[in-house]
Amino acid sequence: MADGPDFSKCDLIPVIAQDAGNGDVLMLAYMNREAYEETLRTGRVVYFSRSRQKLWRKGEESGNVQELKAIYFDCDADTLLVKVHQIGGAACHEGYRSCFFRQIDPQSGAVTVQGDRVFDPKAVYKK
C-alpha cells in the first residue's frame, strides 16, 4: 500500500480542491513534491504554477488562501484531493467562489455563469 502520492510517476500531479464544509469543488491545480511537502508542513495549500513555473502559495496576491483540513490520494497514488477552508470566499482568480462557474447546457451547448463574483480581479491583481 502506498503511503502518499507517487511523484516518481510524474513530477506534477493533479489536485482537486474541495470545500471541506459543503463539498463544492473549487478548483483543479497541480502540485510537485515541494508544494506537497510545504502544504503538509504549513497547513496552507501550495500548488505549482505551470504557467509561471514556480510554487504558487494560494492567496499570496489575493488573500484568498486555502487552509488545509484533509488530504487524500487516489488508488493509483497520482491524484490528490484537498479539503480546504477557503478564506476570503473565492478560489478563482476571476473572482468567483469556484473556478467551475460556467455551466454548459447539454442540449443546446449554451453557456451560463453560475454565481456572482466575490471580488473584482482588476482591483485585486492590478496587473
Image (tube, helix red, strand yellow):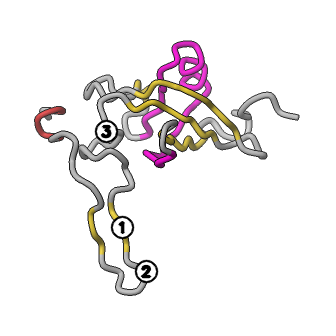
**In terms of image quadrants, where is residue 65?**
top left
- Confirm or deny contact between disc 1 and disc 3 (CB under 8 A): no
14 lies above or below 123: below
Which residue is located at x 43 percent, y 45 percent? Answer: 26
Residue 82 position within the rendered picture, expressed as x and y whole percent measured from the top left: 56, 35
User: Which residue position holds label 3?
Assistant: 90
| Residue range (magenta) | 23-50
Q: Where residue 10 sits: x, y (%)?
A: 66, 40
When asked about the image quadrant of residue 31, the answer is top right
Amino acid type for the residue under numbered disc 1: Gln
- Residue at far top of view: 41
Q: Nearer the viewer, residue 8 or 99?
A: 99
| Residue of label 2 | 106
Q: Quadrant of the C terminus?
A: top left
The secondary structure type at the circle numbered 3 is loop
Q: Gap in Å between the C-alphas at discs 1 and 3?
A: 18 Å
- Which of the 4 image quarters holds residue 120? top left
